[in-house]
């Protein structure tokens, strides 16, 4: 009845099914692992965003690498902006996906160290982005700024190539080590995305709060892969029974006597 299962076609089909089942189960566990990772990151981000602000030098120092636990922590700093050595970061988008620049301004602390402050997004003056854009000035004199602490940007982490030969006062990445070399100063590791004070006229446009990663989607994918793995043997059985039925029907038709022709 089921001798056809030994045919080359069905042997290959069976082997494929046996291979698919553990593969799909493994993919389900991988998606569940991604769900747990994203949920943990969302929790860290939520805790960092709701934590009370602390002085920036409690969390970072020259040469320090901002850790995952320190990322997005709200920090404060007192000093003054050094707009003469301000640069812009190329190819950055705002909430509406418009391409422009981020404004990166050195903030000189009262002890002489420098904190890199991303003051926000401004539109590009033209499609070439070769000229230094018109940048709204920050408050003058000594002030206190607040922002979210961020790690240095690298090509490996961001996928952004650190191009050379850029127009004057333009950079591709926000990197404290590179800026320390350019400024010839003691620059705190990482940088902050400014949240206060808010700029006059809403320009530069402050960087928005990070959103939660869609961890629930990974959970749904895990369930989906496991359902697929359960469907494989069910589908195999259905196909085998249908093949048996079709073969039995064909055999009956071959053995039935032909009806006599009508004269």
Image (spheres, grey):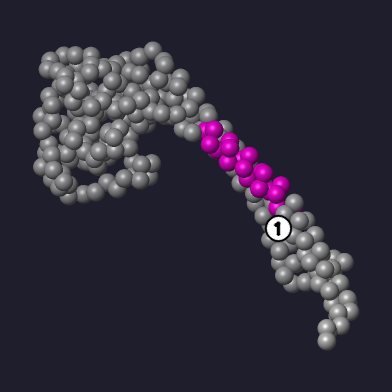
Work out which residue is located at the far bottom of the displayed protein and give it.
263
Q: Residue 247 or 232: which is nearer the viewer?
A: 247
**Secondary structure beneath label 1:** helix
Q: Quadrant of residue 153?
A: top left
Q: Quadrant of residue 244?
A: bottom right
The verdict on residue 228 being magenta is yes
* Residue on which the image places disc 1: 17
x%, y% of residue 237?
Answer: 78, 56
Q: Is residue 190 left or right of residue 127?
A: right
Q: Quadrant of residue 50?
A: top left
The residue segment tinted magenta is 215-233
x%, y% of residue 215?
Answer: 52, 33
The verdict on residue 65 being magenta is no
Work out which residue is located at the far front of the displayed protein and give it.
263
- Residue 9's place in the image compared with 81, above or below, is below
- Look at the image and tell me whether residue 110 can be seen: no
Q: Quadrant of the N terminus?
A: bottom right
Q: Is residue 158 left or right of residue 34?
A: left
Residue at screen point 85% across, 66% down: 2
- Residue 145's place in the image compared with 104, above or below, is above
x%, y% of residue 92?
Answer: 26, 38
Magenta: main secondary structure: helix
Mark 1, residues whose alpha carbon is within 10 Å: few (<14), some, or many (≥20)?
some
x%, y% of residue 61?
Answer: 32, 25
């Amino acid at each position: 009845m089921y001798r056809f299962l030994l045919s080359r076609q069905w042997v290959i089909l069976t082997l494929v099914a046996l291979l698919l089942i553990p593969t799909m189960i493994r993919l389900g566990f991988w998606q569940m692992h991604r769900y747990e990772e994203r949920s943990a990151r969302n929790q860290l981000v939520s805790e960092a965003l709701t934590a009370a602000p602390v002085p920036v030098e409690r969390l970072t120092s020259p040469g320090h690498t901002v850790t995952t636990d320190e990322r997005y922590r709200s920090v404060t700093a007192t000093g003054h902006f050094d707009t003469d050595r301000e640069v812009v970061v190329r190819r950055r988008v705002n909430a509406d996906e418009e391409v422009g620049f981020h404004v990166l301004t050195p903030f000189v602390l009262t002890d002489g160290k420098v904190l890199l402050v991303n003051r926000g997004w401004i539109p590009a003056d033209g499609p070439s982005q070769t000229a230094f854009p018109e940048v709204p000035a920050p408050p003058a004199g000594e002030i206190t700024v607040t922002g979210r602490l961020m790690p240095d940007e690298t090509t490996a982490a961001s996928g952004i190539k650190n191009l050379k030969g850029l127009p004057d006062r333009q950079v591709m990445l926000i990197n404290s080590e590179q800026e320390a070399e350019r400024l010839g100063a003691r620059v705190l590791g990482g940088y902050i995305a400014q949240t206060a004070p808010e700029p006059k006229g809403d320009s530069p446009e402050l960087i928005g709060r990070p959103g939660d990663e869609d961890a629930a989607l990974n959970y749904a994918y895990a369930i989906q892969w496991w359902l697929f793995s359960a469907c494989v043997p069910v589908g195999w059985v259905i196909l085998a029974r249908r093949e048996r039925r079709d073969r039995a029907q064909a055999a009956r038709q071959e053995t039935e006597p032909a009806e006599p022709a009508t004269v």
